[in-house]
Image (cartoon, rainbow, N blue to C red):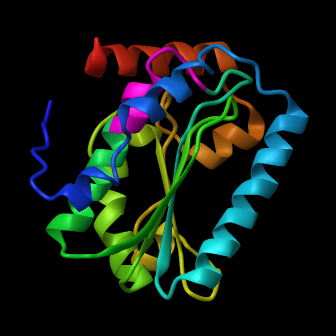
Amino acid sequence: MEKFLWNDPEIEQLLLNDAEKETLEKFIGADAELPDMLNARERRVWMQEQLLSEFPGVLVSFTLNIPGQVKVLPLVPEAFAFALSEIVSALDTAKIPVLKRSLILDKTGPEAFLCVDADALAVKRLLVPLEDASDLGRLYDIDIIGRDGKKISRSDIGQPGRTCLLCGRPARECSRSRAHSVAKLTERINAIFHEHFS
């Protein structure tokens, strides 16, 4: 597994620190009921709108794709921390400055928000490969929201939609039709986490 060596203290501050990881670990195994998820969605939209109004850049909004009521599986803290480090590393390599970093750590799953000073399409092109690079990356949900508040889609940069973890069909189709049980998806996700972090 790739390791990141951070020499810049500003970059270090963008990563998940020990206290934040401990906070997230407290939610391992907690059920997130439907009202919790609806509230989390509203909170996420509010956070996105606030950050876009306060900062001149575009927004990277990151979560993990975890189905079912338990959003913080045992290795989610490690996966989230690693994914955030990959995103920060890609932005740093591309010389894209991060203006603000915010986190939400809750039983509804961890969320990271990075305001960056760059073109939205360029940021999407930069970060989509992280979602496609490995089975672990397929669990990343990295949204790019432009200055106008609109989300940049994969099709906006000529990329196909995402595929299902279990069968390889379009993920949206499987999700809409509930083709696979939450138990089967969770089993696959746990296997991916164990491959990378055990």
Q: Is residue 195 above or below residue 48?
A: above
Q: Does residue 30 belong to the magenta stretch?
A: no
Side of 20 relative to 195 (left or right): right
Residue 161: x percent and y percent? 50, 57
Side of 181 relative to 65 (left or right): right
Report the front residue among 7 and 35. Answer: 7
Q: Is residue 168 above or below residue 194?
A: below
Quarter of the image holding residue 21?
A: top left
Side of 134 relative to 138 (left or right): left
Residue 111: x percent and y percent? 56, 47
Q: Give the residues drawn in magenta, as a range.
A: 72-81
**Residue at x 46%, y 38% (from the top left corner):** 139
Side of 197 relative to 187 (left or right): left
Residue 161 visible in the shown view = yes
Work out which quarter of the rendered image holds the C terminus and state it.
top left
Q: Does residue 76 belong to the magenta stretch?
A: yes
Dominant SS in magenta:
helix
Report the front residue among 165 and 58. Answer: 58
Report the front residue among 140 and 52. Answer: 52
**Residue at x 68%, y 73% (from the top left corner):** 50
Residue 57: x percent and y percent? 46, 83
**Residue at x 52%, y 37% (from the top left corner):** 164
**Residue at x 40%, y 14% (from the top left corner):** 191
Residue 87: x percent and y percent? 32, 55
